Image (spheres, rainbow, N blue to C red):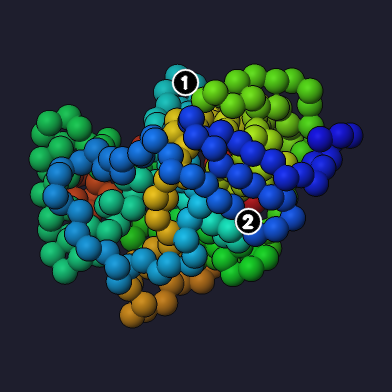
């Protein structure tokens, strides 16, 4: 990389301990067998997850799966934060980004007896003080380049599934010479003002895929870590695997039988900013009472 620009290359990178080859400028990705197998750990009850083929539409095979710890400061006065595990499925042309726990909960509730089964799990976990294991920081599924040139977000406002598509916007990154190591990869720093926040990202050209968590992309390598300048939102990669990463899929709450309510990004943000605590709707649905509190933090996007 020279003068902040990625040079054409035929390169290699290491994922954990085995070789993976990339060729820039082409839709090319090959890898040998990788010794590290990423287990898809639900963190919930073994055997509960049903078949969800009707709720998932495959876009294309995935070539990489990354997992990030998302931390959100939900009370800027006390500094209290909540964490969540988010999955980034990367394909040759598209990617999907969503919460592991959200997909589990939504997949279960979409089944014929799902709402009752989920409510029983919520009640049980509430009694055991483990309710956070069944809840997520977000209801959003973010699909990059689906359809081509657009970013589609599916989410819920209270119990209403909504969808909006926006033209893909690349943050205007300023590249830095600062270097640090994340998960054994040499990462470089970049900064950008994006939708009301200043973001700092650490990316590695060892994995020359221009993707990252949330809507942070456009760098000459995969983003391993990102956070805003106020440290209210952060993403830290905890694992990366190219072995059997599955498919990049789109979750459909209705299984193709109904349409999502169409909204715009700004209308969604304005409506969401008026909602209460991040998991209030889920708690109400499960009969766990009103967990709602006054929102004491700003949204990730502040340009609404």
Q: In this view, which residue lies farthest toward the front?
A: 32
Point out the residue furthest to the right here: 3
Lateral position of residue 104 relative to residue 152, left or right:
left
Does 51 appear above or below 217? below
Q: Residue at x 61, y 36 (%)?
A: 13
**Pick the front one: 108 or 138:** 108
Report whether residue 88 is seen: no
Residue corresponding to mark 1: 79
Splitting the image into 4 quarters, where does residue 52 fall? bottom left
| Residue 38 seen from this side | yes
Give the residue at x 86% y 34%.
2
**Residue 139, horizontal then vertical, whole percent:** 40, 51
- The single residue placed furthest to the bottom in the displayed view is 257
Q: What is the quadrant of the N terminus in the image?
A: top right
The residue that label 2 is drawn on is 28
Q: Nearer the viewer, residue 294 or 174?
A: 174
Compute the Cα span from label 1 to label 2. Answer: 44 Å
Residue situated in front as seen by the camera: 281 or 113: 113
Residue 22 location (% of width, % of height): 64, 47
Please tell me which residue lies in front, 29 or 283.
29
């Amino acid at each position: 990389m020279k003068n902040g620009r990625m040079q054409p290359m035929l390169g290699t990178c290491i994922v954990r301990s085995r070789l993976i080859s990339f060729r820039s400028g082409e839709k090319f990705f090959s890898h040998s067998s990788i010794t590290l197998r990423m287990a898809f750990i639900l963190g919930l009850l073994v055997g509960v997850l049903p078949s969800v083929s009707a709720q998932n539409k495959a876009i294309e095979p995935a070539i990489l799966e990354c997992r990030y710890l998302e931390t959100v400061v939900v009370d800027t006065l006390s500094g209290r934060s909540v964490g969540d595990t988010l999955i980034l499925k990367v394909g040759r042309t598209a990617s999907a980004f969503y919460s592991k726990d959200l997909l589990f909960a939504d997949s279960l509730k979409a089944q014929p007896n799902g709402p009752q089964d989920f409510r029983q799990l919520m009640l049980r976990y509430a009694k055991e003080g483990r309710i956070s294991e069944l809840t997520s920081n977000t209801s959003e599924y973010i699909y990059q380049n689906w359809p081509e040139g657009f970013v589609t977000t599916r989410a819920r406002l209270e119990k209403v599934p909504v969808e909006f598509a926006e033209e893909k916007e690349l943050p205007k990154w300023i590249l830095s010479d600062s270097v640090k190591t994340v998960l054994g990869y040499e990462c470089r720093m970049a900064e950008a003002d994006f939708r009301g926040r200043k973001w700092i990202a650490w990316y590695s050209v060892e994995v020359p895929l221009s993707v990252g968590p949330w809507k942070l992309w456009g760098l000459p390598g995969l983003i391993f870590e990102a956070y805003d300048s106020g440290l209210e939102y952060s993403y830290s990669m905890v694992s990366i695997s190219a072995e059997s990463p599955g498919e990049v899929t789109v979750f459909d709450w209705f299984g193709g039988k109904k349409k999502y309510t169409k909204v715009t990004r700004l209308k969604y943000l304005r409506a969401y900013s008026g909602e209460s605590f991040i998991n209030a709707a889920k708690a109400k649905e499960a009969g766990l009472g009103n967990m709602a509190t006054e929102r004491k933090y700003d949204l990730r996007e502040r340009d609404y």
